[in-house]
Amino acid sequence: MDLSYEVDSPLAPPVELLEQLAHYDWSFQDGGQTQSSSPSVFLRKLSDQRGQTVFLQHSIPIMTEEMARNALLSFVNSRCCYGNRAAGELVIQDLRQQMLYRYRLETFSESRLSEWTFQPYTNHSVDGPKKGTSPRPWDIKVHVPPMFQEETKKFQVPHSSLVKMRCASCSGAKRKAKQSRRCQVCSGSGRKRCSTCSGRGNKTCATCKGEKKLLHFIQLVITWKNSLFEFVTEHHMNFPEELLAKVRGENIFKDENVMVYPIVDFPKQEISLASQRGIAEHSTALAGRSRVLQQRQTVELIPLTEVQYWYQGKSYLYYIYGLENKVYAADYPERYCCGCTII
């Protein structure tokens, strides 16, 4: 018989059980969840004195014709449908190298969500309100993962467990009664034994697993998230900017603290403005909702070179970008198949 239909049990216990938790203010929205506001005491006070911007030592080699040709040869040799003859015979006419600045702000934060959930009650000891007051969401101490490493964990809130004596799905009968719909296996004749219910017309309740009772408790969901703000200075070349996110740059500035200050004295004004905008955006997005654990802002130099070359009477372009010397060659002349995406 077709007994796949199940009535979902409500996550939250009935009102009469909630009265047992009256000693503590757990307020939940529709759906049995509530977002816990981050206490301001977690935000460490910053010093009034702003430190001077300190640049890291860096060195990026100037692109030469030999380096440009080798980068293209390496690129075409890694593609099954690209010939390397053009890369070997082309005549490089001009190299235009630019140094782009990439600003990144990472904000590692922690948010806490409280929700009702349940599990089958197997007559084990119940950690309910009689054993003490449930701690508030931000009073529960947990192990924090490494900084800037995202993770989600769930914890049972102490002293929040309540036992519902009758499962709402099966009304405490252990099994779900057969439905009024015709059995798809025997077409309603009853002549073929149903593999689901073994011919009994009912099956074990999927909600309480046949235990008849449900244990409701408050579950704390903690999410550690790394928010990212990124800005790259303009290059005025016919090059897809999204490719820059896939390469490394030379790190010339790094600042890490519980909360970082906006950069104000960077030689490139766009970077200072991006720093101010990024910090303001993260502050607005996380205020009152998440606890900021650490922030990190960096500035990188990303080399981008436009290579103009001549091959068999025509002029072409390709681009070399990142410290890895990756190549973007949208109009490479020796391609043997269509529809290739070149990245």
Image: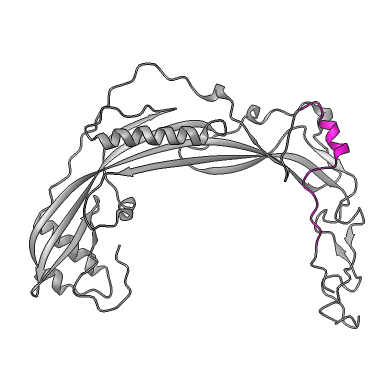
x%, y% of residue 118? Answer: 77, 46
Residue in the foreground of this view, choosing between 50 and 85: 50
Q: Is residue 315 magenta?
A: no
Q: For residue 135, which quarter of the picture?
A: top right
Quadrant for the N terminus in the image: bottom right
Residue in the foreground of this view, choosing between 3 and 101: 101
Left or right: 229 as drawn, with respect to 65 = right
Q: For residue 320, which quarter of the picture?
A: bottom left
Q: For residue 2, which quarter of the picture?
A: bottom right
Q: Main secondary structure of the magenta part?
A: loop
Residue in the foreground of this view, choosing between 14 and 141: 14
Residue 147 visible in the current orientation:
no
Residue in the foreground of this view, choosing between 140 and 53: 53
Left or right: 267 as drawn, with respect to 215 = left
x%, y% of residue 61? Answer: 14, 46
Vertical placement of 170 versus 57: above or below? below
x%, y% of residue 41? Answer: 56, 21
Q: Is residue 14 magenta?
A: yes
At 15% from the left edge and 61% from the top edge, which residue is drawn?
70
Quadrant for the C terminus in the image: bottom left
